[in-house]
Image (cartoon, rainbow, N blue to C red):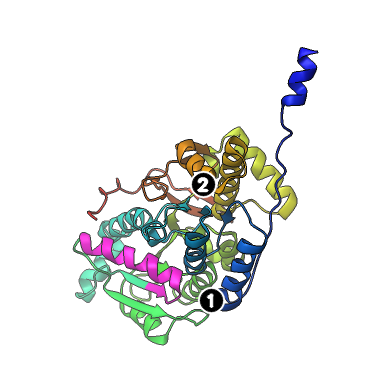
Amino acid sequence: PSTLDARRSTPPPLPFRLVPRWAPDPWRAGVSLLTRMVYDEQPLALLGSVDSASTHLAEQVVAKAQLPLLSPCTTDKSLTLAGVAWMFAFAPSDPAIARPLVDAVLAEGSQTATPAVAATQSAIGNLKSKILLLSGTDHESRLTTREVMREFSRRNQLPDTRFEIAPALPVPPEGLAAIDRSPPTPIVLVATPEDSARWLNTLRERHAAHPSTGAAPRFFGSHTMGRTRFLELAGASAEGVHFPLLWDSSTASPAASSFVARFRAARGHAPDYAAVYTYDATRLLTAAIRQVGPNRGRIREALIALSPWSGLAGPVHFDGTGQNTATTIPLGTIRNGVVLPLRPATVPSQPPSSP
């Protein structure tokens, strides 16, 4: 009887229902759909969104409705600096991403040239290694570029040439001409996965080897080169690019390996960092709800109390603003169409910038 009574007193597991909302225009239809959902369906928390602009809109809604908002893969540092106590960001912030990228670019630019290249440079007389930066003008790319430029400035070495390109547009002729005039140079692409792939394909085709030295430029990119969409669109051009790696599948735990296998079976390809961070955010949220029940305020407190928490993408440790404090980001590369860590690291990461 005592065992039976105990079983009767144990509450059944809480069921969860995911209610998706999507709109191509977040500023009008998107925020309207979200507001109606928050007040009509009374969700316990929100997961999303896919970029920082729409997440900022959702942040305004949750600040009034007072429910947790978990941003899985947006790297905009201002998300958690807006003073909204209900905001939690899982991905590393743009400043943490900029440091290893700039480390690698500057190390590449300072490497000693091969004897053949050095001889050619000496004969021409005015050639030196330069840094070219191509950046997108979309909201997400501008935020990342801003932190990359700040990191270059902190090292007292800004890119020699910089071009800003609107979404879906090709590399401008003056950008191609700038590469023609320079020796093998580090070329940095900070853009969406789609634009990064488009520009890389163009540059690989035109600049397989520099006409003066016979050497090919080294391509670097932001963390978006770790997205599945970039791999699909860039194809063979992605071989050998270097970028900050937000998730290292080669060091995955057994739980992560199981997730990768199930994801691959369902989608036909391995998950990228955005999928893994979203999975981690969902797992931590459900763990918090199971611990405290369907109460928004207590769920927020549980999210804080559960930190540090071991996720598939690594430890999740929120600071006082709700930002995951992950700052140790290795470099990654692509070999034979697979995202892999680049070891050993090019140079040790510099200390964090002052606020």
> What stretch of residues is rendered in magenta?
134-154
Residue type highlighted by circle 2: Gly
Q: Is residue 56 above or below residue 202?
A: above
Q: Where, quadrant-wise, is the N terminus in this rendering?
A: top right
In which quadrant of the rendered image does the C terminus lie? bottom left
Give residue 315's mark.
none
The answer to which quarter of the image holds residue 126 is bottom left
331 or 224, which is in the foreground?
224
Q: Circle 1 — which element?
A: helix
Q: Quadrant of residue 286?
A: top right
Q: Is residue 74 left or right of residue 286?
A: left
Query: Where 300 sits versus 336, above or below?
Result: above
Q: Which residue is mark 1?
A: 27
Query: What amino acid type should be assigned to the residue bearing mark 1?
Result: Trp
Q: Position of residue 41 (x, y in %)?
A: 67, 59
Q: Is residue 104 magenta?
A: no
Which one is in front, 7 or 269? 7
Q: Residue 136: image x %, image y %? A: 43, 74
- The answer to whether one can see residue 185 in this image is no
Position in image of residue 21 (x %, y %): 66, 65
Q: Name the residue at 37% across, 51% down.
A: 321
Mark 2 sits on what residue? 297
Determine the residue positioned at 72% across, 43% down: 15
The CA span between labels 2 and 1 is 27 Å
Residue appearing at x 55%, y 71% in the figure: 194
